[in-house]
Image (cartoon, rainbow, N blue to C red):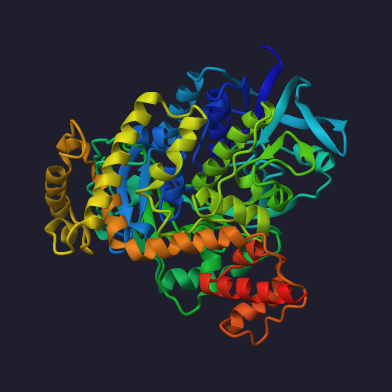
C-alpha cells in the first residue's frame, strides 16, 4: 500500500465511515484505519437508528449524500414514525436495525468506494510539524511502527481512548465489549493540541436470550405504514420483526435500591460524567424516587437472532443484581442474561477547542468527530462525521470550510452547541435544542440541504433531477394553495390537523388536477407523500413559518452584536427570573452566545438586542 494519502480517518464507527465516505467520494485519496474491519459501524448499544431529533439528523445526512440512510434501507427490521399525534416538525422516524447485517453492509459498501483504502491497525501517535503560530498534521504512526502520511486527519475514536468497562466493582480495559482499548493515542493528542482530555461515561443494558422471554405478557409495538424511509427514493416498507414494551415495577425498584452500594456508578469506581437523558437504571431510580415504573423497550438485534435488547436498563451493577431486577419484570420472570450490562468510561476532547468545521483551532488539518467530541448516539456521530470528511477534503484543496448554521439544519445546531458551549455531559440531540423547529422539519430536509450534497459531488445527477422535479411540485403546489380562495376544498384538506392517508390520497388527486396546466408531463405518481406532507406543513404553519424566518433573519443580522459589559440583567423587563439568573451566570459577550444558553427564548433575544443597541448608542 502506498503510504501517502490526502485524508486519514482514524476509527470506523458511525462517524468514521461517514467521514471516509464523504472525503473519498469528493476525490480525496482516503485511508480508513480500524482495529477490526469486521466490526465496521458496529452497534454496541441499541440496535436502532433515528427517533426524535436523531431522525432529523439522519434525514440531513441523506440530503448531503451520506452513507447511514443507504445502509438503513438495506438492514431495517421495523419502521415507526414517533410523535404522530403532534405536528410534522416534532415527529421522528425510528428504524429497528439488524445490527450485524448493518455492520456487514457498511463494510461491503465502503469496499466499493473509489479512492478509499481500508487498513487494520491501532494508531498510537499523531505526527505533526511546526508551522507559523501553530502545528500541522503530517501523518500517523501505528502500534507496529508503520507510518502513513496525510494532509488532513479525522479522529473518530468513539469510546476507545483509554476505555474502561465496569460491572459492579470489576473493571477491565476495553474500548467496547471484547475489544482492546487504545491506551497511547490520548497522550499523543494532548501533546499535539496542548489540551488535557477529560472523561465521560456511558453504558449498555444486559442482553437477554429471546427464547427465555414470555412475549405474550408484553405490549406489542405496531409498525407505521410508510412508503419512505430516510432516503429520497421511495421504498416498499415492510415489518420483519416486532418490538415490545414491558415495565419495571416496585419489586424492580426495591432490588436496585437495595444494591446501590454495589453499583460502580455510586461506589466511587466511575469518575466520568454520564448522560442525563439516557441514564443507567440505578441512576434513574435514584433521581426519581417517587416513580415506581419505567418503560423498557424490548428490541431484537435481528430477525432469527437469539438475543433481545432491553432499552432503558443500562447498568453498572454486578451480574447477580442484574439477574434479580431483570427477572422481577413481567415477561422476564425466566429471563436468561446472555451478556451482562456494563458502564464504560473513555477520554474525550472538550469540543470548544474546535472550529465549526470540526478542525482543531491550533493544529492545522486535525479534525475530530463523533463520541470523542462528547456526544452520544450513532446519529450524532454520523452527522459530525460527514461534516468533518467534507471539510478535510475542502481544507486540502484550499477551499472555504463547510459550516451549517442553526437555522438551516439540526447538524448545524448540534455543532454550534458543541463548539460554543462545550459539554458537561454526553450530548444528545432533541428537537427542543433547535430554536426554529418549524423551519427544520424532516419533510423539508432535502429542500434545505440537497443542494449542498450536489455541490460537493455527493449527490448524483439522476437523483438531483428527481429532487428538482419534486421541488417544483412543492413550490407551485404551495403557491397555488396560498393564493387560492380560502374556501377551496384543496386548501381545507391541506390545512387539516389530521393529515391522514385517506386525506393525502384525496389531496394528491385534487392537487394533480390543479397542477397539470402548470407543470408539463406531470404524472400523479410524481406527487409523493413527502411532497404532500411538505405542502401540508407549509400551509398549516404559514403564519408561524413567516414569523420564524423573520426571527431567524433578525438573529443572523445581530448575532455578532456585542452585549455591553455594563448591562444589568436583574429586573430587566420581559426577562423571567430564571433567564436573568442564567445570563448573570454565563455573561455572554455576543447575541449569538446568549442565544445558546439553555432555555433562552426568541422573545428574550429580541429584548437583549434592543437593550444592547440602546446601551451601545449611549457609549
Residue 434 can be seen, yes or no: no
Viewer-closest of 61 and 259 = 61
> Residue most toward the bottom?
571
Q: Is residue 530 above or below residue 557?
A: above
Viewer-closest of 106 and 396 = 396
In-image side of 260 versus 540 (left or right): right
Q: Quadrant of residue 259?
A: bottom right
Q: Is residue 472 above or below residue 82?
A: above
Viewer-closest of 194 and 250 = 194
Label tally: 0
Residue sitting at 76 percent across and 19 percent down?
146
In-image side of 80 versus 412 (left or right): left
Residue 503: x and y in percent read 15, 55
Q: Quadrant of residue 22?
A: top right
Viewer-closest of 291 and 402 = 402
Q: Quadrant of residue 270?
A: bottom right
Residue sitting at 27 percent across and 51 percent down?
479
Residue 341: x and y in percent read 53, 52
Residue 596: x and y in percent read 61, 63
Residue sitting at 76 percent across and 41 percent down?
186
Residue 131 can be seen, yes or no: yes
Residue 135: x and y in percent read 83, 35
In-image side of 116 versus 231 (left or right): right
In-image side of 75 versus 34 (left or right): left
Which quarter of the figure is the C terminus placed in? Answer: bottom right
Q: Is residue 311 above or below residue 354?
A: below
Which quarter of the figure is the N terminus placed in? Answer: top right
Amino acid at each position: 500500500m502506498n503510504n501517502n494519502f490526502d485524508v486519514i480517518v482514524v476509527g470506523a464507527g458511525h462517524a468514521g465511515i461517514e467521514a471516509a465516505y464523504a472525503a473519498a467520494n469528493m476525490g480525496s485519496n482516503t485511508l480508513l484505519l480500524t482495529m477490526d474491519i469486521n466490526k465496521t459501524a458496529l452497534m454496541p448499544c441499541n440496535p436502532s437508528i433515528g427517533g426524535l431529533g436523531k431522525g432529523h439528523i439522519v434525514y440531513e445526512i441523506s440530503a448531503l449524500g451520506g452513507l447511514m440512510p443507504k445502509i438503513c434501507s438495506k438492514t431495517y427490521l421495523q419502521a415507526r414514525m414517533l410523535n404522530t399525534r403532534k405536528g410534522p416538525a416534532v415527529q421522528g422516524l425510528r428504524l429497528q436495525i439488524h445490527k450485524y447485517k448493518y455492520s456487514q453492509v457498511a463494510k461491503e459498501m465502503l469496499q466499493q468506494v473509489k479512492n478509499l483504502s481500508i487498513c487494520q491497525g491501532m494508531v498510537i501517535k499523531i505526527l505533526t510539524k511546526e508551522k507559523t503560530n501553530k502545528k500541522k498534521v503530517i501523518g500517523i504512526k501505528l502500534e507496529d511502527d508503520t507510518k502513513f502520511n496525510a494532509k488532513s486527519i479525522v479522529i473518530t475514536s468513539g469510546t476507545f481512548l483509554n476505555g474502561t468497562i465496569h460491572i459492579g466493582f470489576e473493571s477491565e480495559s476495553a474500548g467496547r465489549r471484547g475489544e482492546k482499548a487504545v491506551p497511547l493515542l490520548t497522550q499523543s493528542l494532548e501533546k499535539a493540541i496542548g489540551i488535557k482530555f477529560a472523561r465521560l461515561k456511558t453504558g449498555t443494558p444486559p442482553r437477554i436470550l429471546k427464547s427465555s422471554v414470555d412475549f405474550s405478557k408484553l405490549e406489542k409495538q405496531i409498525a407505521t405504514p410508510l412508503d419512505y424511509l430516510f432516503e429520497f427514493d421511495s421504498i416498499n416498507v415492510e415489518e420483519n420483526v416486532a418490538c415490545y414494551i414491558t415495565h419495571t415495577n416496585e419489586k424492580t425498584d426495591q432490588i436496585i435500591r437495595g444494591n446501590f452500594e454495589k453499583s460502580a456508578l455510586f461506589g466511587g469506581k466511575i469518575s466520568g460524567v454520564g448522560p442525563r437523558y439516557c441514564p443507567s437504571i440505578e441512576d434513574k431510580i435514584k433521581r426519581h424516587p417517587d416513580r415506581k415504573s419505567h418503560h423498557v423497550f424490548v428490541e431484537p438485534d435481528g430477525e432469527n437472532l437469539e438475543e433481545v435488547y432491553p432499552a432503558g436498563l443500562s447498568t453498572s451493577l454486578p451480574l447477580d443484581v442484574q439477574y434479580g431486577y431483570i427477572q422481577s419484570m413481567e415477561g422476564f420472570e425466566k429471563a436468561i442474561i446472555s451478556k451482562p450490562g456494563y458502564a464504560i468510561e473513555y477520554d474525550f476532547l472538550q469540543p470548544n477547542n474546535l472550529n465549526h468545521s470540526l478542525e482543531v483551532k491550533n493544529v492545522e488539518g486535525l479534525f475530530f468527530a463523533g463520541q470523542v467530541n462528547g456526544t452520544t448516539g450513532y446519529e450524532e456521530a454520523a452527522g459530525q462525521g460527514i461534516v468533518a470528511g467534507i471539510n478535510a477534503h475542502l481544507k486540502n484543496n484550499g477551499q472555504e470550510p463547510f459550516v451549517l448554521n442553526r437555522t438551516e439544519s439540526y447538524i448545524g445546531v448540534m455543532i454550534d452547541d458543541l463548539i460554543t458551549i462545550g459539554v458537561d455531559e454526553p450530548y444528545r440531540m432533541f428537537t427542543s435544542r433547535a430554536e426554529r423547529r418549524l423551519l427544520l422539519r424532516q419533510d423539508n430536509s432535502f429542500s434545505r440541504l440537497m443542494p449542498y450534497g450536489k455541490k460537493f459531488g455527493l449527490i448524483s445527477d439522476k437523483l438531483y433531477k428527481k429532487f428538482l422535479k419534486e421541488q417544483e411540485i412543492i413550490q407551485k403546489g404551495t403557491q397555488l394553495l396560498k393564493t387560492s380562495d380560502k374556501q377551496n376544498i384543496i386548501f381545507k384538506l391541506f390545512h387539516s390537523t389530521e393529515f391522514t392517508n385517506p386525506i393525502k390520497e384525496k389531496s394528491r388527486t385534487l392537487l394533480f388536477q390543479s397542477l397539470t396546466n402548470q407543470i408539463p408531463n406531470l404524472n400523479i405518481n410524481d406527487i409523493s407523500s413527502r411532497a404532500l406532507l411538505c405542502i401540508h406543513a407549509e400551509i398549516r404553519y404559514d403564519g408561524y413559518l413567516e414569523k420564524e424566518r423573520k426571527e431567524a433573519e433578525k438573529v443572523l443580522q445581530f448575532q455578532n452584536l456585542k452585549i455591553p459589559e455594563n448591562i444589568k440583567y436583574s429586573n430587566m423587563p420581559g426577562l423571567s427570573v430564571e433567564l436573568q439568573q442564567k445570563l448573570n451566570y454565563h455573561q455572554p459577550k455576543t447575541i449569538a452566545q446568549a442565544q445558546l444558553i439553555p432555555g433562552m427564548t426568541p422573545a428574550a433575544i429580541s429584548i437583549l438586542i434592543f437593550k444592547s443597541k440602546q446601551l451601545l448608542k449611549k457609549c
